[in-house]
């Protein structure tokens, strides 16, 4: 039973035991409408994962005489507009680019359930790049045939370069204006990431550094907004990227720096199955950047990347603080986030002191 309805973008909350029942009815309704069938359906719901702003469910639908259909249902936890924005952006990208650019693989949007603040997309087969790299959880047997880390970085750089290419705009933006605007957006999204004093210092430092660099205006492109190994699904014949909740337009450097810093944040021995050093992950992050620059023809200097790394570190601090507040104090995942936040906080302090980020 619905406890509170959607009103002005506020999410609908269901009792835990009743939400799956409501979800089953909605999945059945969507499939019957899509396939125009009156045949009986059997629907199974399994929770797959959770994040700060959403829960993801796998929906298995059996239609008599047909092959089993699998969908993913992503439900908002607090802010329904994030899921609605993700549906609108995924549908926009699918309708506008997918049929023209078959190489840019994204999940097909199926439907958006407003009363349940839930997005439905087709199931994507494959493994997350984070799992393949082995820095999440216990060691796994690498099933993916290109076992070389360089090949994996090539796949990630190829997809991103192609995505930026097909979503490119004719307008351009100065580097200083771009980084100031993106910092404002991150502070709005994660207001508790750093203190107000640090925020003021960051704006001044970023402006001074950006103006001191001899940079050309950046081409405005579509940006994934959260491009990291956890949102990249890899199979033997393709690369697919999910989770467009933070899609926006601006300098593509945001996506590039986001991916590179994510590798760096997961370099601690506590979060790496093979206990590789920080230098190991930075080496492949730099290889990713070089590959991207060669493909995209939007070359970014190391100084530009380092400034955008600061933004990612600030965002990581905000994410970690919110996750710790919502999670268990003694959970292993919380401990890992604390370790990452310590490293990110040190990098921000180094930047404010004028030290090299490495």
Image (spheres, rainbow, N blue to C red):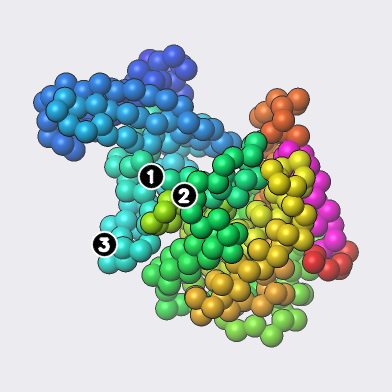
**Quick one: quadrant of the N terminus?**
top left
Task: Looking at the picture, tell me which residue is in the foreground, 117 or 158.
Answer: 158
- CB contact under 8 Å: marks 3 and 1: no
Q: On the image, which quarter does residue 199 sit in? A: bottom right
Mark 2: secondary structure: strand
Using the image, determine if residue 236 lies above or below residue 150: above
* Mark toward the start of the polypeptide (1 vs 2): 1
Name the residue at 55% across, 71% down.
292
Crowding around mark 2 (Cα neighbors within 10 Å: few <14, some 14 to 19, many 20+) is many
Instruction: Tell me the residue that label 1 is attached to.
Output: 124
**Quick one: quadrant of the C terminus?**
bottom right
Q: Position of residue 61 (x, y in %)?
A: 27, 28
Name the residue at 54% across, 78% down.
294
* Mark toward the start of the polypeptide (3 vs 1): 3
Using the image, determine if residue 127 lies above or below residue 95: above
Name the residue at 65% across, 53% down.
262
Q: On the image, which quarter does residue 349 sit in? A: bottom right
Q: On the rendered structure, is 309 left or right of 39?
A: right
Start-end of magenta stretch: 336-352
- CB contact under 8 Å: marks 1 and 2: yes
Mark 3: secondary structure: loop
Instruction: Tell me the residue that label 2 is attached to.
Output: 233
Q: On the rendered structure, is 1 left or right of 358?
A: left
Distance in Å between CA atoms under marks 3 and 1? 18 Å
Crowding around mark 3 (Cα neighbors within 10 Å: few <14, some 14 to 19, many 20+) is few
Instruction: Tell me the residue that label 3 is attached to.
Output: 99
Give the prevailing secondary structure in the magenta stretch.
helix
Q: On the rendered structure, is 339 left or right of 181?
A: right
Foreground tag (3 vs 1): 1
Q: Position of residue 44 (x, y in %)?
A: 34, 22
């Amino acid at each position: 039973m619905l406890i509170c309805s959607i009103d002005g973008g506020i999410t609908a909350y269901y009792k835990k035991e009743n939400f799956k029942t409501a979800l089953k009815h909605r999945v059945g309704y969507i499939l019957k409408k899509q396939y125009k069938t009156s045949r009986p359906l059997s629907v199974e719901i399994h929770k797959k994962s959770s994040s700060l702003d959403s829960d993801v469910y796998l929906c298995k639908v059996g239609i008599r005489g047909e092959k089993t259909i699998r969908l993913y249902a992503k439900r908002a936890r607090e802010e329904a507009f994030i899921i609605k924005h993700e549906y609108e952006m995924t549908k926009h990208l699918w309708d506008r680019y997918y049929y023209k650019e078959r190489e840019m693989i994204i999940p097909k949007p199926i439907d958006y359930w407003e009363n349940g603040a839930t997005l439905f997309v087709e199931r994507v087969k494959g493994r997350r790049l984070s799992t393949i790299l082995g820095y999440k959880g216990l060691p796994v047997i690498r099933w993916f045939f290109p076992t070389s880390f360089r090949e994996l970085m090539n796949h990630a750089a190829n997809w991103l370069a192609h995505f930026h290419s097909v979503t490119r705009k004719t307008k351009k933006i100065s580097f200083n204006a771009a980084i100031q605007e993106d910092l404002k957006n991150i502070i709005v999204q994660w207001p508790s990431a750093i203190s107000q004093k640090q925020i003021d210092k960051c704006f001044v430092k970023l402006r001074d550094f950006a103006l001191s660099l001899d940079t050309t205006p950046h081409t405005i492109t579509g940006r994934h907004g959260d491009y990291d190994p956890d949102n990249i699904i890899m199979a033997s014949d393709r690369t697919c990227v999910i989770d467009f909740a933070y899609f926006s337009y601006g300098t593509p450097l945001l996506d590039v720096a986001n991916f590179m810093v994510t590798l760096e944040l997961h370099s601690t021995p506590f979060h790496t199955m093979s206990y590789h050093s920080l230098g190991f992950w930075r080496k492949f992050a730099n290889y990713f950047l070089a590959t991207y620059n060669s493909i995209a023809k939007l070359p970014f200097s190391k100084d530009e990347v380092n400034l955008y790394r600061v933004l990612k570190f600030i965002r990581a601090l905000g994410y970690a603080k919110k996750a710790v507040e919502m999670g268990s104090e003694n959970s292993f995942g919380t401990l890992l986030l604390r370790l990452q936040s310590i490293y990110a906080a040190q990098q921000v302090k180094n930047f404010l002191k004028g030290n090299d980020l490495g």
